[in-house]
Structure formats: structure tokens, C-alpha cells
Image (cartoon, helix red, strand yellow):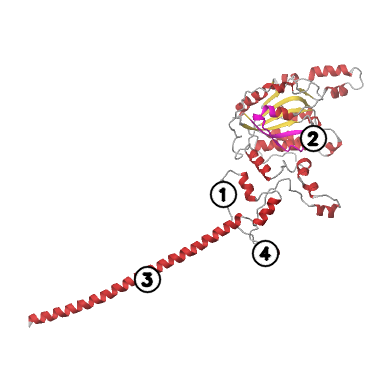
Amino acid sequence: MAAFAVSRSSCGLLSGLKASFKTFGQVKHGVASAAVAQSQLQQQARRCYSVSHLSVQERIDRKRNAALVGGGQKRIDAQHKRGKLTARERVALLLDKDSFVEYDMFVEHRCSDFGMEEDHNKVTRHNRGPYDTSYLFITGPDVVKSVTNEDVTQEELGGAKTHTAVSGVAHRAFENDIDALLNLRNFFNFLPLSNQDPSPVTECHDPSDRLVPGLDTIVPFETTKAYDMLDIIQGIVDEREFFEIMPNYAKNIVVGFARMNGRTVGIVGNQPKVASGCLDINSSVKGARFVRFCDAFNIPILTFVDVPGFLPGTSQEYGGIIRHGAKLLFAFAEATVPKITIITRKAYGGAYDVMSSKHLRGDVNYAWPSAEVAVMGAKGAVQIIFRGKSNQAEQEAEYVEKFANPFPAAVRGFVDDIIVPSTTRKRICRDLEVLSSKKQTNPWKKHANIPL
């Protein structure tokens, strides 16, 4: 019985185990099914995310492509038809390849007036157009006509010739965008990266001790005869490369950038070909602005002097030549960069003093044998000193003998040496090397008070 009972108990246990295994199989199957379902859900979610992500990426690409064409192909074609490049084309031409990183490409305007909400590509991107096609003015011709009754065209009021030759608002004019941008690249190469950096120095293949024999005979024997100061400048600088600033405005003074033995320098020079090189209001302001720019960016200044004085006349006096002439004096006096001055011929009166003289803290001041450092020319001085007396020709010859030469200035220490003109480049390159470590500061003040 007992054995039978045990057997029945075992059968019951076996039946229970079978039932349990059946239930476990169902659970296992259920768990497996749930896992499959979960996997399917995850795959579906990934597919949805991928589709959504792809949709966003497609929108990004579409927006980026739309931004790259600006106002659209029609407007690009219209810009090209006017002889102009687009903003992006200008940037690509101006900068080194692949160096430009653009920000805020997706910014759009939010103006809804005058139907502007339909045009989402009008992002504020203003350009610098060339002067074969650009105008600058505060009020246009229509306003001028209504207020002053003057008839004037856009070109006459604010065109290239007006602003580069008359007003002095613009520094250079170019034929087209490409010419302008290539010249701008050239201009940037003369400048340091910031006002904390020294004047740039590049590799130079033009010997620093090169003689320039043509300079020995470039100044005419007759003191009233003109010559071109640009011939002197180009003969001295590296590779004859001179980047002139404002070449069509106040032509009686020349300013621009060059290199001496690879080092960037700013150059200021009187131009005997125009108004005999006299200083006037416009040339004083032009020179002062340039000198201050050089000083702001640690660029040494070379000054070539042939100046008979300030331009006389009521228009100059009424226009404030005293105040404006003082700007140039102030600029040279304030500058702490290396300053080297070469007197090629006339250096008369107050104008001599203004042109980076020793009295304005010039570091090195040279005179050529043809230099005349005096209060004024012999004829004018004799007419004042010996007014009403006879034998003025004799007195004039005596004045020339005494003062129309570099010796009176040299014996007083106003010039450091009388040099042979052909050695000028050699002397300047050597002096620039010595002065490269120059450190000079002005007394502290809140700001300077230049006579504006």
C-alpha cells in the first residue's frame, strides 16, 4: 500500500511538474513575444528618428544652399551685369582660400512691411562697391535740388572723382571689384596684425646697401625747376614698389607705404611738381592723418622734404591754415615710431619745422648737398631785409652763400649728416635696423588735444 501510495504521489507530482512546465513554456513564449515586440518598437523608433533627423538635415542643407545664393540667381546675374561681384565672391577674392568661416548663415529678416515677408533672403549684407559704379553722399541730388535749387548728378555730387580728388573722403578709386580687392590685399600686407605688433618684415631680395646713382643728379641746379618726388621714393624703396594713398587729392604732398630691406615703412614727401611742394590746408590734413595712422600701427616714418613754405593767400588764411597746418606739426611731434628725415632741397621757415624736423623729435635727419635750410628763399629774404636799397643782386648772392646750403643747419645740429644722395637707401636701411628697438612714450594724459 505504502509503495502504491508513493507511486500515486509520484504520479501526482509528475502531473504537477508537467503542468508547471506547460505554464513556464507559455510564460517563456510570452516573454519572447514581448521581447520581439519591444525590438520591433525600437526599430520603428529608430526608423522614425532617422527619418526625422534626415528631414532636419535636408532642411539645413536647403537653408544653407538658399543662403549661398543670396537673393537668388536672378539677382546674382543682375549684379554681374552691372560689373559687380556678389558679397561672397568678394570675400573669396579678398581672403586666403578656405580661411573664411561664416556665422549666422541662417539669420533672416523679420520685416513684414511692403510685402517683405515674402522675401526671406534679404539678409543685411552690405558691400563696398567699386568706384566705376558707387556713390557717397549725405543727401542725394533730389534733396539738394529741393533745398538749394542746385542741379547736380549723382556722379558730380558723390562719385569717384569727387571723393578722391575734391573732398578727400575716399582714398583710392579702382576700375572694378577685382582691381579694388586685389589692391586691398596688397595694402593689408603692409600692416601688422594689430596695434600691439611691430611693423611687418618680409623676405627681401633687394640689397639693403644698393646704391642709387640716379639720385646724385635728380635735383635740378635751378632752385625754381621742378622734379618728381616719386622718382626719389621709387628709387630708394624695395623693388621700386610704392603703394600711394590718396594719389589724386592734395597732390602737393605724397603719402604711402613701401618696404626698406623688407620692413614696412610709411613715406611722406613734398611734391615739387605741384604748387612747388607748398603746404596748404588739404595737404596738411592729408599728411597728418597718414602720420597718425603709421604711429597707431608702429610703422616707421620716412619724410622727404622739399618745401618752400606754406601757401600764401586769403583763401588759406580764411580757411584756417594756421590751425590745419598745426595738425601736421602735432602728428609728427606726437609720433613715437622711428622717424627718419631727408632734406632734398628747400626747407624753408615754419614749413621746414613741420616736416618732421629735429625740433619735432626726429631720430635721424639727413641733408643732401642740394639742401637749403633757411627762413625763406634768398630773393624774398633780401627784398625784406634790404627793402629800398640798391645792389640787391649782390646781397642776394651773399645770402645764398651764407644760407642756401646745408651747413648752417649742420653746425647747429639740426641735421645729423650731409650725405651723398646715391647712398640714401643704404643709410636708411641701416638706421631702421638700429631704430627697430626704439621705445619711446609720451607723458600720460587722458587723450591728446590735436587742433581739430
Q: Which residue is mark 4?
A: 112
Q: Amino acid at mark 2?
A: Asp
Disc on res. 37 = 3
Q: In the rendered structure, which disc, 4 or 3, sits on the residue that comes first in sequence?
A: 3
Q: Quadrant of residue 405?
A: top right
Disc on res. 280 = 2
Q: In the rendered structure, which disc, 1 or 4, sits on the residue that comes first in sequence?
A: 1
Asked if the residue at tag 4 contacts the one at tag 2, i.e. Cβ–Cβ closer than 8 Å, the answer is no
Q: Amino acid at mark 4?
A: Ser
Q: Residues within 10 Å of mark 4 (few under 14, many from 20)?
A: few
Residue 388 seen in this snapshot: yes
Horizontal and vertical percent for residue 149?
86, 52
Q: 433 or 274, which is in the foreground?
A: 274
Asked if the residue at tag 2 contacts the one at tag 3, i.e. Cβ–Cβ closer than 8 Å, the answer is no
> Residue at 86% of width from left, 36% of height from top?
314
Q: Amino acid at mark 1?
A: Val
The stretch in magenta equals 234-259
Q: Calculate the distance from the C-alpha at mark 2 to the C-alpha at mark 4.
A: 52 Å
Q: Residues within 10 Å of mark 3 (few under 14, many from 20)?
A: few
Q: Which residue is mark 1?
A: 101
Q: In the rendered structure, which disc, 1 or 2, sits on the residue that comes first in sequence?
A: 1
Q: Calculate the distance from the C-alpha at mark 1 to the C-alpha at mark 4.
A: 30 Å
Asked if the residue at tag 4 contacts the one at tag 1, i.e. Cβ–Cβ closer than 8 Å, the answer is no
